[in-house]
Amino acid sequence: MSQATLTRKQTAYDPEAPAAAPPPNATRTAVLKALGYSALTVFALLYLFPFVIQIGTSFKTDPDATANPLNPIPSNFTTAAYQQLFQQDFGLWFTNSLVVALLVTAGRVFFDSLAGYALARLRFRGRGAVTLAVVATMAVPGVVLLIPKFLIIKQLGMYDTYSGMVLPLIADAAGVFIMKNFFESVPVSLEEAAKLDGAGVFRTFWSVVLPVAKPALITITIIAFQSSWNELPHFLVSRASPETNTLTTGVAGLLTGALGAGNRYPLKLAAAVLMTIPVALMFFVFQKRIISGSLEGAVKE
Amino acid sequence: MSRKTTTAAVAACLTGVLALAACGGGGGFDSGADSGATQPTASGPVTLKFMITSNGPADVKLQQDTVKAWETKTGNKVEVIAASDINQQLTQGFAAGSPADVFFTDANVFPTYAKAGNMLAYGDQLDMKSDFYEGLVKTFTYDDKFYCAPKDFSTLALIINTDMWTKAGLTDADVPKTWADLETVSKKLTTGGVKGLVIGDTRDRVGAFMKQAGGWIANADQTQMTADTPENLAGLQEVQKLLASGSAAYPKSVDSGWGGEAIGKGKAAMTIEGNWIKGAVKNDFPDLKWKAFELPEGPQGKGTLSFTQCYGIASVSKNQAAAIDLVKYLSTAEPALALAKGLGVMPSLKSAADGYKAAFPDEAAFLAGAEYAQGPVTVAGMDPVLKDFDTQLQGLPGADPKAMLARLQKNGQAALS
Amino acid sequence: MRRGGSARAAETRSGWLFVSPVIIVLGLFLVAPIVIAFWVSVSDWNGRGSPLSSGVSFVGAENYRQLLTEDSLTRSDFATSLRNNFYYVLLVVPIQTVLALALALLLNQRRLKGLSFFRTAYYFPSVTSSVAIASVFLFLFAGGGSVNALLGIFGIDGPQWFADPRGVLHIALGWVGIGNGADGPGPVALTSHDFLGLSWWDWLAGPSVAMLTIIALVIWVSAGGYMLLFLAGLQNVSSDVYEAAAIDGATRWRTLRSITLPLLRPTLFTVLTLGLIGTWQVFDQVYIMSKGNPGKTTLTPAFLSYDQSINNGQWGSGTAMSFVLFGIIVVFTAIQSLVLRDRDPGSRGRFGRRRAVQPVTPPNSMQPMGPTT
């Protein structure tokens, strides 16, 4: 959805400015506007300043970081923290995170839409029960399952392997529901035309339904990538050796490192900057899609 | 289609999945767990996984360099793994039946591992057994079995910032010999932003005072808790007195993570730390001038604490013979001394003491402590109790030390029984 | 007839085929772990080898009994973690909900331009990794960190945030003369009674100063995600309603109170439920930032259960803790939904349906509300 549509929509539904209200007093409007912007700006500062400090401090030296914690501009600009990161295993962590996130994303997009389609469109025995079961799994608090998940992964002989890191994340109930909801909104006529042409169920799904589901697919691509890229507890319990460290476990190790290791703030913040970049890129490219995606409900009213 | 049948269908499906999970990797597992007692013979060159803790890449390299000679001699390979959280990684390895073959084992966790049967008791196969300090051998003995070779050890000493010392008009003659001396010099050294003495807020530092007062957490053979005694109380009260006087403080109140950081940042003139301070200070605070002295005596004489790790070997390791051979090699004077020098700790071999003294004449205080140092409490299930005591000690400035000791006594007794 | 039947059979076949990968993954990594965990919680498994091997025996409710009734360190630690998490929930859920709603209302104004920039700014923390955010907050709230530097400008000597175990309620009670502040002993009436091995006075400690930093972090991170939910809810409100209100001459405040908020109730329900489920499980931040320190005041049941199993090898009581936590979450969610429903017995079909689905999706997963047809 483009920005223009969004704005137009807001105009139509704006609760704060009733359409039938008498023309407001110009000064009052200006004051309210100023107040609105000030409030927005205060919050924006609160939300952005930590990131500014993060980036600034990552280019500082250790003593500079400790001495001037509030000033984001380095007095001695240095990339030492970044160089140090790459001398350690940072590159490996990054690669692992990328591989895992891409595999998980691909898997989720495919399996979630497959299941979502079946639950939305195919009439089969047990559909209601499956739907119910999937809903129920969403209610299970994930953290409670940490240790048992480790036990299963190890029981299956996938402990400390890529498969143990990827497979448990490769489908998720929430994604299934996003897809199911979407497919329910697609007109049935499309598939019926395909069926009359004699296409099989999978053919219909793959070449007729999936292409029109692009918006929903983008949404779950983003969710899947972001959540697997940022995942920590699962990688704490599904792997152990340094070769399988992801960014989250590796950097968490940096943060909780040995006592004598000193503060090393620039190093830690540089790690934080680097691990934020891919998600940030994705976020800014698909930003409109992400946010309007969550506003989609309004469009269909 | 009735709801019941469909629910049953889903249930059956999930059960199937479960059964799959249950049978999945069972085989490999059980065989792994049962092989604990057997001693597989190493045929041909093997690759040993060697899990270590490190403070950085330099430590890892040192370890790799040290095992090179053994690799050349035996044709085996050693894969050095630097753990980020060694306890977690080992625990998961034990449960999975695939831990590292050789791993650093801290004295704190040793009894837990030994009790669960995760470690091979190979100590008696070592020909240099009599060359280890007796205290260290005792630390790594569980259920009358000597489990693993002590790697090295450290003791606590009084670390003094010599610049501040002379600036305060103090000389070598003023080095504190008693608690009273310590109070006096701490007071003299305390100025505006500098505390005379900064000590860590855990049993691993405060406990030294308990020892100097003639007490300790448990009795000699660790069958009884001896926490709630007048001696221990005297030790804690001394620390409390120092803290209350304002001339001593815990590290966190001077914005430091530990004593070494406090003295390095110039926020403390003295601290009580172990050998590891050397490496840490060299990296983080190269300009600090310091000297180590034996800890002052308490009412019952000298007292310090020692800390140690051993080379654990997994009971499920397939390469136990090679692993023991590696440990034997690492426990000979030359590599032991090289490692000790690199890491700043002291070799666990008595025969290497002279070599160490010659290399580090300034650190005689640490080695002197070895003769009367108290080792850590090594009882399975005691770790959380001791950690809880640490938590209590954090409140020492205000709280009642008697209550802390009573709590330690109660919880510890529960862990012993 | 026959052709129709086979098409039907084909559809059934494909239906099961299509959902089977999801069922297998969820079954293996969600359902099976629950079953195994439950077995471990009633067994004497010590962490070595498989919990399903023959050497492991059934001990009944022993682990639960020990955890909940035996006077032990484990019980008082568990009680401490429950206390900490309770105060955490008590602060995080209302504040993040109100903040999210406020941000959404701010962003839902026609007069203002350039709102997408602000929306992005508020939402961005929700998509970044908890590890990265934690590293920033560790720096901001360090003893000599940015926050204390900022306070210093106003002449305030900030605390050692991460090292300060003092309970804020104890501090506050000290001001009004109850107890001796955070360091001293509490009143005898409260210290002489205990529940689960923790004295009444200790239950009343409130969140510690260190816990406040984690609370601040979580509110800061998650408000943006909930803000989007509220925004979506606001857009769902038909403009006719506002037009009618305007014709009636209702003020802004009245419009907000008597029209906007009641209509946002389904969203509010979602936000509160997600908030409750999420906050009772706090793990990442504790694992990265504090490991339960200082003075066990940031210990939470989720972290304690992990620590108890992995680090202390007490797998039985560790998993038992997970199940007690699970029970707590179920109870709290049920209470919350009862309270919200009782106040408005009138059912609304559309939202009612939605409730069943939404409360359980992760808060920061950018879930679209989905077309409501």
Image (cartoon, coloured by chain):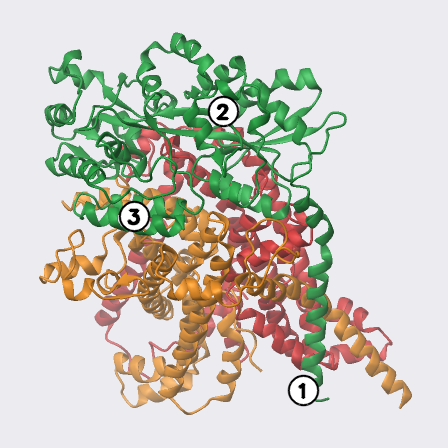
Q: Are marks 2 and 3 in contact (CB under 8 Å)?
A: no
Q: Quadrant of residue A115?
A: bottom right
Dot placed on the residue nearer the N-terminal end, 2 or 3:
2
Of the numbered discs in the image, which one, if any, rests on residue B409?
A: 3
Front residue of B43/A21: it is B43
Measure the alpha-carbon separation of dots 3 and 1: 59 Å
Q: Secondary structure at mark 1?
A: helix
Horizontal and vertical percent position of residue C360: 51, 71
Horizontal and vertical percent position of residue C232: 46, 72
Residue type at tag 1? Arg
For the residue carrying disc 3, how many other residues have a C-alpha within 10 Å: few (<14), some (14-19), or many (20+)?
many
Front residue of A146/A41: it is A146
Residue occupying the point 13% across, 31% down: B247
Disc 2 sits on a residue from what chain?
A: B
The residue singled out by tag 1 in the image is B3
Of the numbered discs in the image, which one, if any, rests on residue B59?
A: 2
The tint of chain C in the picture is orange
